[in-house]
Image (cartoon, rainbow, N blue to C red):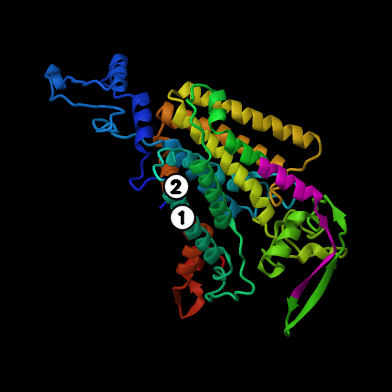
Amino acid sequence: MGMYDLVKNDDGLLDDRIQNILALEEGIESRKVDESAKLLAGKVIKPSGIGGVDSPSVEILVGSADCPSISAAKAVRLVSLDVFRGITVALMILVDDGGAFCPAINHSPWNGITIADFVMPFFLFIVGVSLGLTYKNVSNRIDATWKAVFRALKLFTMGVVLQGGFFHGVHSLTFGIDLLKIRVMGVLQRIAIAYLMAAICEVWLTNDVLVDSGYSLVKKYQLQFLVGGVLTAIYLVLLYGLFVPDWQYQIPIPGDRSILYSVKCGVRGDTSPACNAVGMIDRKILGIEHLYKRPAYGRTKQCSINSPYSGPLPADAPSWCGAPFDPEGLLSTIMAIVTCLIGLHFGHVIVHFKNHKARVFQWMISSSCLLASAFFLIYFGMHINKALYTVSYATITTAASGLLFAGIYLLVDVCGYRRPTYSMEWMGKHALMIYVLVACNILPIFIHGFYWKEPKVNLLRWLGFTV
């Protein structure tokens, strides 16, 4: 099942009202414009049959309580959602497999941005868009909330199992993890939290406003915009306002011993790898033993003689180079939620604007505002940093997400160029499965488990993979 399976209806299509909108917009080829008006008016249409022979009349009562959906037309799926998700999955695989050989597609060691740093925001963005299409006709808010909580818990639990250290990688046929050292946060865990918060906002924080313009759209969902603003303010206050004291960590060495390292901080508002509030909050709440053990800042010039590649420590390496740090930490997840809420806004545009031009126009306005905000923040000194998920990083990646999604929408859903994107569409429909099997190394581990006489003689080695 794909990542969208967490937020779509059971039949894999959009809800009834959205089906009506999309089907009316795309049109049934044999209908004329005046016939579409009759659809909206709830009138009976008697289409002509093949060869001029009248076919049996078909009653389509749009908006009627007896027939809420368009029964004579096939529901239209928004293909651009799957294609966007598929491109993100393909990019993720490229980064995982080629990032070690090409710094341009590997995650930035600290400040800065590379292609790899767009993967997580792309996933969060498209989850938000999907939510905007799913939770429109909520008849029971409490029931919808509990379903969202259950789905988020399933995704979070899956993330802990896959990324918590239970599997020891393709180099080992062993598994198991000490619960005192299990990694709590991760990619799927962050997506689960963002999904849950965005779903709650969508279920509970909407106004009864008729949307006929961009202003009325903002007014209808003004409480959601308020939540996004409050979360951003909380993040900034904590990131730049918390005092980070000196701290220590241990690295185990052979012989059941460990080396104790001390990191000098005593600062406020620092965004360096050693003394930022993001890492301090995770160390205090989650515990340093439950954080990611191989952070990207290990490839910085201070920590690697082969920077931006991994390598031996320089002779004058600072004490924090070997310290754990979680790039999907608690404080940085606040801005991940904001990214999902922005995607939710893009989903609202699909629901409330019925023609292509209006949708693309609204998306371009939003993306341009985000891009301008990013440049403004960068100009005034806020670094783009994925590990901290800074506001400048959030704005520039969501702007890129919006522009890319608008482009895919024009190419696939408007112009109809689906054939070149079939592979991406398939990957998008099965995003979660591909992520689990490939990105989490479940498939390579499974293949590695079948060997000839000794583990090193296996199919992966025959195929040219070093294991």
Q: Which residue shows up at 43% across the image and 48% down it?
A: 144
Does residue 128 belong to the magenta stretch? no
Instruction: Tell me: residue 51, above or below residue 166.
Output: above
Instruction: Tell me: residue 407, above or below residue 311.
Output: above
Pointer 2 local density, CA inside 10 Å: few below 14, some 14–19, many at least 20: many
The numbered mark, 1 or 2, whose residue comes first in the sequence reads 2
Q: Quadrant of residue 223?
A: top right
Residues under numbered marks 1 and 2 in contact, where contact means CB atoms less than 8 Å apart: yes
Amino acid type for the residue under numbered disc 2? Val
Residue 192 at x, y percent in the picture: 53, 54
Q: Which residue shows up at 54% across the image and 56% down it?
A: 188
Does residue 250 belong to the magenta stretch? yes
Name the side, left or right, on which 49 lies relative to 202: left
Q: Quadrant of the C terminus?
A: bottom right
Residue 253 at x, y percent in the picture: 74, 79
Q: Which residue shows up at 53% across the image and 50% down it?
A: 196
Which secondary structure, mark 1? helix
Tag on residue 7? 2
Name the side, left or right, on which 154 lies relative to 37: right
Residue furthest top as drawn: 34
In depth, the one of 34 and 313 nearer the eye is: 34
Pointer 1 local density, CA inside 10 Å: few below 14, some 14–19, many at least 20: some
Distance, label 1 to label 2, CA atoms, is 9 Å
In depth, the one of 56 and 135 nearer the eye is: 135
Magenta part of the chain: 230-251
Q: Is residue 102 visible?
A: no
Amino acid type for the residue under numbered disc 1? Arg
Which secondary structure, mark 2? loop
Residue 41 at x, y percent in the picture: 30, 20
Q: Which residue shows up at 83% across the image and 55% down it?
A: 243
Tag on residue 151? 1
